[in-house]
Image: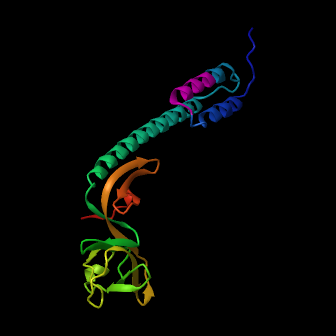
Amino acid sequence: MTMLSSVSSSSNTQNLQAALNTGTKAQESSQDRFLTLLVAQMQNQNPLNPMDNAQMTSQLAQINTVQGINSLNDTVKGLGAQFAALQSLQSAALVGKNVLVPGDSATLAGGNMNFGYELPMDVDAVKIDVLDASGNVVRSFTPQDRAMTSAGVHGMSWDGKTTDGRTAPEGEYRLRVSSTTAGREASNTALTGQRVAGVTADANGVQLLLANGNRTAYTGVKAVF
């Protein structure tokens, strides 16, 4: 009479579980490992305590879960590649256009400078100072329209006229945005208006090359005008 090994079902179940938990292996490898261990477990099970249907169903469900996760990972990778390709196409359409992106400096050229700010919440008041290279305030803006103090992105432009009516020289100017609500400082983000000169892609994703020589992430664009 052939004697059967008395290797316990629980021991084989632990080995099987460890194999299933690797997670990073290919789906085919997981399936092969699962089937090999399952057959070994059935061959060496204790005849006095054989694997019941519930154990079999549970382990089959586990391998199906692993397969499902692997399939989901493949799907997500595919969607990620498609999304990156879509971003590249969309960003290429921005070349030659002006965008608002985070930045605290803007360029006055041809009697115009585009800039803006973003508010995460409604505020009571907003003030924007335009400063020259020496840190002097050459022009200030305090929007009175309530729409300009509401949460969201707001664009503005400056014609280069200083507070005393003179024409400011062309070049780079710094932006200082302050906002208050209920007498307290409120969060805001200064935005610079820049022309998109080109597009590139690297490990950080799609990048826009700006006319001022800087670059910014495509996802950082707040508005196009």
Q: Main secondary structure of the magenta part?
A: helix
Indicate the quadrant containing the C terminus: top left, top right, bottom left or bottom right: bottom left
In depth, the one of 112 and 177 nearer the eye is 112
Rendered residue at 25%/59% (across/down): 97
Q: Is residue 165 left or right of residue 28?
A: left
Q: Is residue 11 left or right of residue 54?
A: right
On the image, the x and y values in percent for residue 223 come to 29, 65
> Does residue 27 show up magenta in the picture?
yes
On the image, the x and y values in percent for residue 89 come to 29, 47
Rendered residue at 52%/26% (across/down): 28
In depth, the one of 93 and 33 nearer the eye is 93
Q: Is residue 62 left or right of residue 84?
A: right
**167 in relation to 49, above or below:** below
**137 in relation to 36, above or below:** below
Residue found farthest to the top: 1
User: Do we see residue 9 in this rendering?
Assistant: yes
Rendered residue at 24%/78% (across/down): 159
Q: Which residues are magenta?
A: 25-38
Q: How many marks?
A: 0
On the image, the x and y values in percent for residue 7 come to 74, 25
**192 in relation to 89, above or below:** below
> Does residue 30 show up magenta in the picture?
yes
On the image, the x and y values in percent for residue 209 come to 36, 56
